[in-house]
Image (tube, rainbow, N blue to C red):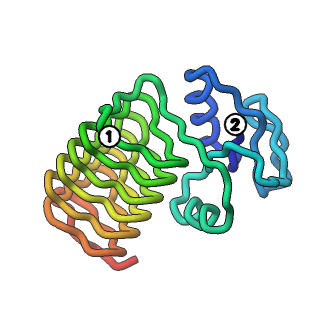
Amino acid sequence: MYLYGASGHAKVIVDILKANGLDVECLFDDNIAINSLSGKAVRHDYQGEGPVIFSIGSNRVRKMLDEKWQADYATAIHPSAIISPTATVDKGSVVMQGAVIQTEATIGKHCIINTGATIDHECRIGDYVHVSPNATICGDSEVGEGTWIGAGSTVIQCVKIGKWCVVGAGSVVIHDLPDGVLAVGNPARIIRKL
């Protein structure tokens, strides 16, 4: 197993893989000043070794790398996460400690479902989405590609959030959001286009 990106996010993924009895062979990073992380070597010459997970928090960078490479992508799911047998988690995605993904929910590729986040029944989470710690996505909601749901936010049932949005930490989304907006507050209001 290999990780691309040597930062704090990588440290969490290393722990998740260890909890599953898997070892990280090494990490890769473009920053030549980083030579080790969590006791693992960091190389700067990725040559398509696999399987690999992007250990990078930026949704846009994960998308850029995915479009650039044709790698063998893996997933990392912490054993404390609860995932319904009818839910799906696509390649490259990471599900962290204590997350819950309920029945028939779908998680796209290269997503981050962070610590304690909950994704309820029949939700559709697009590619490259980051659902931050303790965020809640209620049943039958949709989150578009590249969107970031801030820590502790709540999306009520049957809401559709567009692509490449940001929902500020602690916000409560009660209405649909169009593509490319920043929304904050309780209830969440659009404060600007991104």
- Compared with residue 33, is residue 99 higher up or lower down, i.e. above or below? above
Q: In this view, does 136 lie to the left or right of 113?
A: left
Assign the C terminus to one quadrant of the image: bottom left
Which residue lies under the disc numbered 2?
A: 1
Seen as rendered, the residue at the extreme bottom is 193
Q: Position of residue 171 (x, y in %)?
A: 25, 54
Mark toward the start of the polypeptide (2 vs 1): 2
Q: Position of residue 113 (x, y in %)?
A: 42, 43
- Compared with residue 92, is residue 63 higher up or lower down, i.e. above or below? below
Query: Which amino acid, by three-letter code, is at mark 1?
Result: Ala
Which residue lies under the disc numbered 1?
A: 87
Q: Is residue 83 left or right of residue 3?
A: left
Q: Residue at x 31, y 44 (%)?
A: 135
- Are the residues flagged by discs 2 and 1 in contact, CB closer than 8 Å? no
Q: Which residue is drawn at 17% across and 56% down?
A: 186
Q: Which residue is drawn at 51% across and 53% down?
A: 110
Query: Which amino acid, by three-letter code, is at mark 2?
Result: Met
Q: Position of residue 51 (x, y in %)?
A: 67, 43
For residue 189, what is the image quadrant? bottom left
Q: Which residue is drawn at 23% across and 59% down?
A: 185
Name the foreground residue: 111 vs 184. 111
* Mark 2 vs mark 1, CA separation in Å: 24 Å
10 Å crowding of disc 2: few (<14), some (14-19), many (20+): some
What is the secondary structure assignment of the residue under circle 2? loop
Name the disc covering residue 187, or none. none
10 Å crowding of disc 1: few (<14), some (14-19), many (20+): some
Q: Position of residue 20 (x, y in %)?
A: 56, 23
Assign the N terminus to one quadrant of the image: top right
Q: Is residue 88 left or right of residue 77?
A: left
All told, the count of numbered labels is 2
